[in-house]
């Protein structure tokens, strides 16, 4: 249950916002966007549902909930890890559940839905109805004969050459979170709004279907594609020390990738409107199954006046060609490819006095954070690269001259807009809307001029060259700073973003009152 102070009202919400691994527990990026959206629509009542991996995964909230966030409910994909004396109690409970459910041999609509997720390509209302059946307790999934029979059927159909034990445990890991989430109480709302696909998008789609209320889906990064990137790089799929053989790894990887793609298609099919942040990602959504006529682009926006107040006009010292402060701003996670940033700093520092900062939360993926710190030590950069926790906006961009973003995947990064508003040139990898944000998305926009330099993915040499080019050309930095501020002021105002979502929520309320919903 959510904390008492979050239970501000028990009346139905206007919008149920379904989140996964983000607000209010993770700072920056999507969380900042969510916080601004809620706070900018004080007339709209939001019920927040956050899906996390397990209890205790997040130490504290990173944001104070606005007054119109009327409730916060935390749901989890799995139970917390048992410790000490809990182990024996958990074991007794599991054995009792196994005995109780093993005698129940009948299938369920939820199991039928899971079977269809893997064996059918058709995504329609009947599939959501099966999954929404609510007739499968998580204990029956973990210990019941029918669930075991389904696992064996899928093994024979999808991965007969794989190791059975590995397949079975991945089958459970994949579907137990979904079954667990389907048991959760459903908040009443006029509109259900998911901020990603995956488990959150599927849950919001099912709640929308159950209630006969519209679903709005907003994707910042493309969840299914990002999970594929992670699976492509997962150590257990390839390389030294892998825990499964090649045949098993290939089968499991294919199963996970399809699973996330199908979850995305279920959310796309149910959504009355599918929002992306840029045309490049909208095209990918359509390619992945979103109905083109239901897709729209709503770019991120910046409170320019606030940024200009925090960062008065920046003056570039024309003599400053030998010293540069560069910064990466974002989560310290693999998809941000901070390793490439660190390697670029190593290459660039051989030609200039360089100070680098990695600014952002470092506790989301501690293993990756440790890898980055070790690389800094290995390259002898401890005196140049500093890891800094998230900074308040009025300090963030005062401590860097150039923003560097080396992500494998992005949508329309807020940090590029913030840097542009603050008069800071950007070096960014060519993903999502980064090129559009730095070079312009239309003829009029391109006429403003570039506000940064775009590089290839995972290209430290290219990134280092871009840093050195900016360091050695103060006039170029000045021109790019001016272009960034003009581009943000012209095309990326926060009030336009908020107006678009106010209209989408009002449209959802109208659809709900008129009994209109998607298939």
Image: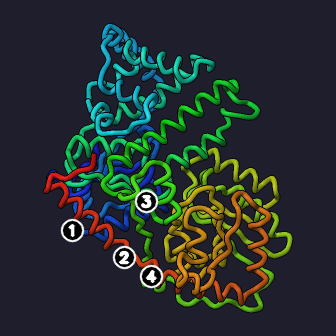
The span from disc 1 to disc 4 (Cα, nearest Å) is 23 Å
The residue indicated by pointer 3 is 31
The span from disc 3 to disc 4 (Cα, nearest Å) is 19 Å
* SS label for mark 3: helix
Among the 4 quarters of the image, the one containing residue 352: bottom right
Badge 1 local density, few (<14 within 10 Å), some, or many (20+)? few
Return the mark for residue 304.
4
Query: Which residue is at a point 39% across and 12% down the rendered structure image?
Result: 95
The residue indicated by pointer 1 is 43
The span from disc 1 to disc 3 (Cα, nearest Å) is 20 Å
Quarter holding the N terminus is: top left
N-term-proximal mark, 1 vs 3: 3
Badge 4 local density, few (<14 within 10 Å), some, or many (20+)? many
The reply to whether residue 114 is visible in this rendering is yes
Query: Which residue is at a point 35% across and 29% down the rendered structure image?
Result: 113
Q: Nearer the viewer, mark 2 or mark 1?
A: 2
Q: Where does residue 268 sit, x and y in percent of width and height? A: 38, 49
Badge 3 local density, few (<14 within 10 Å), some, or many (20+)? some
Mark 3–mark 2 CB contact (< 8 Å):
no
């Amino acid at each position: 249950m959510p904390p008492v102070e979050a239970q501000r009202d028990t009346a139905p919400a206007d919008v149920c916002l379904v989140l996964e691994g983000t607000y209010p527990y993770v700072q920056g990026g999507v969380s900042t966007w969510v916080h601004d959206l809620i706070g900018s629509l004080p007339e709209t009542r939001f019920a927040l549902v956050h899906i996390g991996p397990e209890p205790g995964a997040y130490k504290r909230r990173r944001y104070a909930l606005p007054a119109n966030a009327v409730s916060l409910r935390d749901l989890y994909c799995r139970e917390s890890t048992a410790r000490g004396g809990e182990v024996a109690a958990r074991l007794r409970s599991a054995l009792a559940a196994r005995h109780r459910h093993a005698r129940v041999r009948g299938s369920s609509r939820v199991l039928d839905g899971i079977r269809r997720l893997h064996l059918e390509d058709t995504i329609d209302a009947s599939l959501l109805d099966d999954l929404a059946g609510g007739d499968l307790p998580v204990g029956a999934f973990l210990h019941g004969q029918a669930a075991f029979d389904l696992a064996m059927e899928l093994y024979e159909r999808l991965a007969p050459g794989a190791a059975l034990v590995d397949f079975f445990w991945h089958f459970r890991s994949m579907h137990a979170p979904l079954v667990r989430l389907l048991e959760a109480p459903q908040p009443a709302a006029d509109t259900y709004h998911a901020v990603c696909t995956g488990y959150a998008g599927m849950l919001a789609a099912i709640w929308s279907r159950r209630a006969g209320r519209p679903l709005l889906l907003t994707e910042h990064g493309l969840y299914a594609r990002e999970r594929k990137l992670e699976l492509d790089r997962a150590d257990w799929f390839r390389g030294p020390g892998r825990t499964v053989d090649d045949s098993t790894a290939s089968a499991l990887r294919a199963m996970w990738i399809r699973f996330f793609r199908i979850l995305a298609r279920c959310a796309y099919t149910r959504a009355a409107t599918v929002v992306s942040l840029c045309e490049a990602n909208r095209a990918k959504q359509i390619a992945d199954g979103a109905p083109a006529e239901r897709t729209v682009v709503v770019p991120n926006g910046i409170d320019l006046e606030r940024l200009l107040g925090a960062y008065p006009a920046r003056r570039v010292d024309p003599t400053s060609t030998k010293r540069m402060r560069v910064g990466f701003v974002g989560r310290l996670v693999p998809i941000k490819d901070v390793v490439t940033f660190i390697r670029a700093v190593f290459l660039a520092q051989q030609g200039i006095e360089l100070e680098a900062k990695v600014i952002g939360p470092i506790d989301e993926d501690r293993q990756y954070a440790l890898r980055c710190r070790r690389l800094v030590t290995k390259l002898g950069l401890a005196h140049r690269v500093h890891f800094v926790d998230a900074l308040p906006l009025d300090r963030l961009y005062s401590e860097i001259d150039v923003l560097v973003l080396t992500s494998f995947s992005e949508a329309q990064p807020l940090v590029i807009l913030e840097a542009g508003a603050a008069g800071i040139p950007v070096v960014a990898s060519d993903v999502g809307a980064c090129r559009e944000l730095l070079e312009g998305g239309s003829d009029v926009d391109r006429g403003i001029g570039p506000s940064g330099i775009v590089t290839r993915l995972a290209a430290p040499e290219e990134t280092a060259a871009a840093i050195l080019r900016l360091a050695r050309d103060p006039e170029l930095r000045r021109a790019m700073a001016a272009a960034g501020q003009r581009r943000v002021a012209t095309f990326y105002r926060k009030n336009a973003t908020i107006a678009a979502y106010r209209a989408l929520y009002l449209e959802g309320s109208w659809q709900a009152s008129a009994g209109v919903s998607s298939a």
